[in-house]
Image: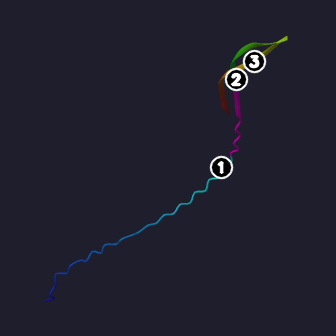
Amino acid sequence: MVKVRNTKVKTRKIKIKIKIKIKIKIKVKTKIKTKVKIKIKSKVRTKTKVRIKVKIKEKTKTKTRTKTKTKTTTKIKIKIKTKTRIKVKTRIKTKIS
C-alpha cells in the first residue's frame, strides 16, 4: 500500500504590470490669417469762456501858481478770466475676421 499524503496545491499569485506607451504625433497645417480693423472716432468739444474786466480811473490835479496847470492821470486795470471745458467722446470699433 502506498501512503497518499494530503498534498496542498500551491496557487501562485502572478502580478503582471503592463505599461503601454502610445505616442501620437499630429501635424497641424493651418495658416491663421487674422484681420483686425480698428476704427477710432473721437469728438473733441471745447468751450471757452472769457471774461474781461476793464477799470479806468481818471484823476485830475490842478496846480495853481500864476499859471493854471491841469494834469490828468489814467489808470487802466485789465482782468482776464478764462474757463475751458473739454469734452472728449471716443468710439472704438474692432472687427476680427
Q: In this view, does 68 lie to the left or right of 28?
A: right
Q: Which mark is residue 44?
A: 2
Q: What stretch is highlighted in magenta?
A: 30-40
Quarter holding residue 44: top right
Q: How far separated are the C-alphas under marks 3 and 1?
A: 87 Å
Quarter occupied by the C terminus:
top right
For the residues labelled 3 and 2, say whether their Cβ atoms are less than 8 Å apart. no
Residue 57 shown left or right of residue 1 in the figure: right
Q: Along the line of sight, which residue is nearer the eye, 39 or 73?
A: 73
For image coordinates 71% across by 36% down, the residue present is: 35
The local secondary structure at tag 2 comes to strand
Give the numbered dot on residue 75. 3
- Taking 9 as reference, is 26 left or right? right
Name the amino acid, label 2.
Val
Which quadrant would residue 52 be assigned to in this image? Answer: top right
**Vertical side of 42 occupied by 71: above or below:** above
- Label 2: how many Cα within 10 Å (few below 14, some 14–19, many 20+): few
Scheme by which the image is coloured? rainbow
Residue 37 placement (x, y as % from top left)? 71, 32
Disc 1 marks a residue whose amino acid type is Val
The structure residue drawn at horizontal position 13% and vertical position 89%, both measured from the top left corner, is 1
Q: In this view, does 13 lie to the left or right of 38?
A: left
Residue assigned mark 1: 28
